[in-house]
Image (tube, rainbow, N blue to C red):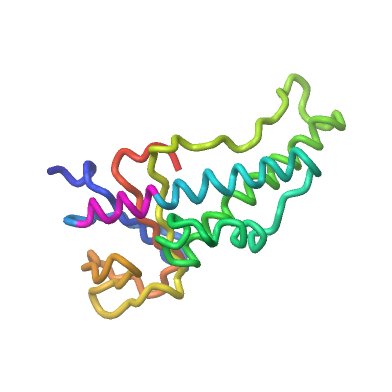
């Protein structure tokens, strides 16, 4: 099977934010189930934020959203920091949406610009990326150990100061 058809792991280095990708072989079933869980977290949080925003034009804090989701099976299927990263990404999208909406309403938007749209729900059967917090990653020699996925052999060169690791499922679409 060609490399580009496999689930990939993206590793970003701190210094220049260079990115490497390599295939995760033999982990596809586990990765897919975890990516479905992150997709469910994204959609559930998006629903919560959308409801709150339509009532009060406020975007709830990440901690408030976490509290509402903590009893859900899919929320507990991934490490807490992974879920927090997803909620942060979504919350930032909503903040940008609110800023663009205010700009559009006040007339400061460029002429001919359309009313901004809020972040969309993802396909409920879809897959979302699986981010890992740098503190959750163990890095020793040629191995990178991720929560739930175990040890993975790193390609050369070995990155020492990792800023981000994300598992991106094959054919997951745009992140």
In the rendered image, the quadrant that contains the C terminus is top left
In the rendered image, the quadrant that contains the N terminus is top left
User: Where in the figure is residue 13, as x and y percent of width and height?
Assistant: 42, 65
User: Where in the figure is residue 147, as x and y percent of width and height?
Assistant: 35, 69
**Residue at (19%, 46%) from the top-left corner?**
3
Q: Is residue 1 left or right of residue 64?
A: left
Q: Is residue 145 above or below residue 57?
A: below
What is the residue that sits farthest to the top in this orientation? 112
Q: Which residues are magenta?
A: 27-36
User: Where in the figure is residue 117, as x and y percent of width and height?
Assistant: 66, 31
The residue closer to the viewer here, 61 or 154, is 61
Q: Main secondary structure of the magenta part?
A: helix
What is the residue that sits farthest to the left in this orientation? 1
The residue closer to the viewer here, 7 or 52, is 52
**Residue at (47%, 62%) from the top-left corner?**
82
Q: Is residue 127 above or below residue 130?
A: above
User: Where in the figure is residue 56, as x and y percent of width and height?
Assistant: 81, 44
The residue closer to the viewer here, 35 or 135, is 35
Check residue 32 for magenta coloring.
Answer: yes
Q: Is residue 157 left or right of residue 52?
A: left
Q: Is residue 40 above or below residue 166?
A: above
Q: Is residue 83 left or right of residue 142?
A: right
**Residue at (55%, 46%) from the top-left corner?**
44
**Residue at (69%, 41%) from the top-left corner?**
51
């Amino acid at each position: 099977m060609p490399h580009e058809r496999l689930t990939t792991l993206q590793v970003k280095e701190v210094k220049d934010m260079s990115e490497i990708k390599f295939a995760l072989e033999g982990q596809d079933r586990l990765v897919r189930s975890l990516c479905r869980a992150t997709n469910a977290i994204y959609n559930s949080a998006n629903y919560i934020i959308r409801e709150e925003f339509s009532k009060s034009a406020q975007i709830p804090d990440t901690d408030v959203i976490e509290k509402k989701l903590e009893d859900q099976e899919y929320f507990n299927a991934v490490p807490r920091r992974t879920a927090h990263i997803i909620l942060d990404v979504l919350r930032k999208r909503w903040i940008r949406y609110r800023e663009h909406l205010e700009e559009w309403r006040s007339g400061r938007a460029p002429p001919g610009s359309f009313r901004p749209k809020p972040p969309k729900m993802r396909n409920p059967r879809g897959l979302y990326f699986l981010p890992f917090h740098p503190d959750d990653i163990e890095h020793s020699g040629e191995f990178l150990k991720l929560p739930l996925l175990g040890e993975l052999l790193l390609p050369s060169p070995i990155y020492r100061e990792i800023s981000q690791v994300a598992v991106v499922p094959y054919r997951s679409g745009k992140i």
